[in-house]
Image (cartoon, grey):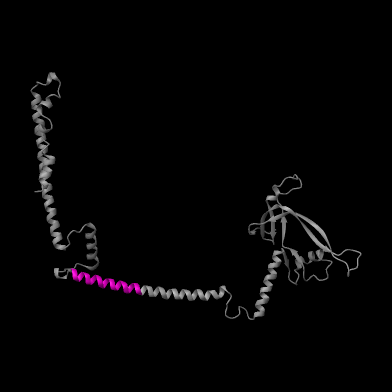
Amino acid sequence: MAPSEPSILSNFLLSAASLPTIMSLQQFTELFPKRLRSHPHIRVLYRELQQLREQDMDIVNENIDREVRQGDSQKAELRRSLAKTGVDGADLNDQREIDMDVQLFGQTSASSDEYHSVPSLLSAMETACTSIEQEIAGVDRDAATLLSELNSTVGGMSDLRYGKMHGSVGPTDEEVVSEAIRGLDNLEDVCYRTINLPTQVNPLVENDLAETSSDQDDLSIYETPIGKLLFPDHSPQNAMDDTKWMKRAYLYVGRYQRMTGEVKKLPKPLAVIRRRQPQGRDEAGASDELEIVEIVRYKLVFKNRPEPVNDV
């Protein structure tokens, strides 16, 4: 027969708790000096300690009885709860879910006939599996429809990618071609760092144009430099081998933009060659000559975009 809760607690807490079991009178007497071991008060003191120990054991015994009664009441409460809910082996999480269902759907008073049997449970599970399969099939159909719509959208965008546009982007095809040519001309002008000004000359720059282009009969078309180049760290007093000034160069584009770059020496110098006709020869049979105009030993490198500055 399995030991009960009172027997376990009593054997563990009370069997070895008496004072004679822990320490006999002789062992207690040997704790005193030899000249006092025969004193009669030692025996009296031992009896008083034994009495105090028995009082403590009585208190422990009462606590054991109280614990047993509390355990019995808890068992009875658990039996009543199981009998009321009809759930066996439910832990704290199961009880929390049951309470949640009660709060959401209310208290249900189901009889024993309403509970599932094995055949009814299998039938309900098959029905649930069928409904889930139908939902999955519906999701697959929706995904296929969405994929077809995406493919058609991407196909429509591929017309823009490969240039298969419906209709003209401008009023006429000739205007589209001319607009593209004008854009390429502007790009070429930017690459050569010059600006082709309009035919109407600005009065503010008319005097400058007259000075720089006095030998030209037509002032309606001319070219002007795109920017002003400065070397802020360069000074005539610098030594010839001083290259610190090459670390910074400014190119002012217009009046409100500035590009920052640096000067780098070319690995091999470059020659700027100009074609000219020889003097004193007949133009019909003469051949052109090449003239070295300049030797280029350095280059300017601008890695960043223009930054805004104040009016220069």
Q: Quadrant of the C terminus?
A: bottom right
**Residue drawn at (12%, 20%), measured in percent from left and top?**
36
| Res. 140 in view | yes
Residue 184 image-quadrant placement:
bottom right
- Magenta stretch holds residue 133: yes
Q: Position of residue 199 (x, y in %)?
A: 75, 72
Near-viewer residue (284 or 80): 284
Near-viewer residue (145 or 263): 145
Describe residue 140's horizontal placement relative to residue 29 as left or right: right
Q: Position of residue 81 (x, y in %)?
A: 15, 59
Main SS category, magenta section: helix
Q: Position of residue 86 (x, y in %)?
A: 16, 63
Count all numbered tags in the image, as a single digit. 0
**Residue drawn at (24%, 62%), measured in percent from left and top?**
97
Q: 161 above or below 8? A: below
Extreme residue toward the top, this view: 35
Q: 237 above or below 281? A: above
- Magenta stretch holds residue 251: no
Residue 99 image-quadrant placement:
bottom left
Describe residue 286's horizontal placement relative to residue 306 as left or right: right
Magenta residues (range) = 118-137
Q: Position of residue 182 (x, y in %)?
A: 69, 73
Near-viewer residue (167 or 199): 167
Extreme residue toward the right, this view: 280
Near-viewer residue (78 or 45): 78
| Res. 63 in view | no
**Residue drawn at (45%, 76%), measured in percent from left and top?**
148
Residue 50 image-quadrant placement:
top left
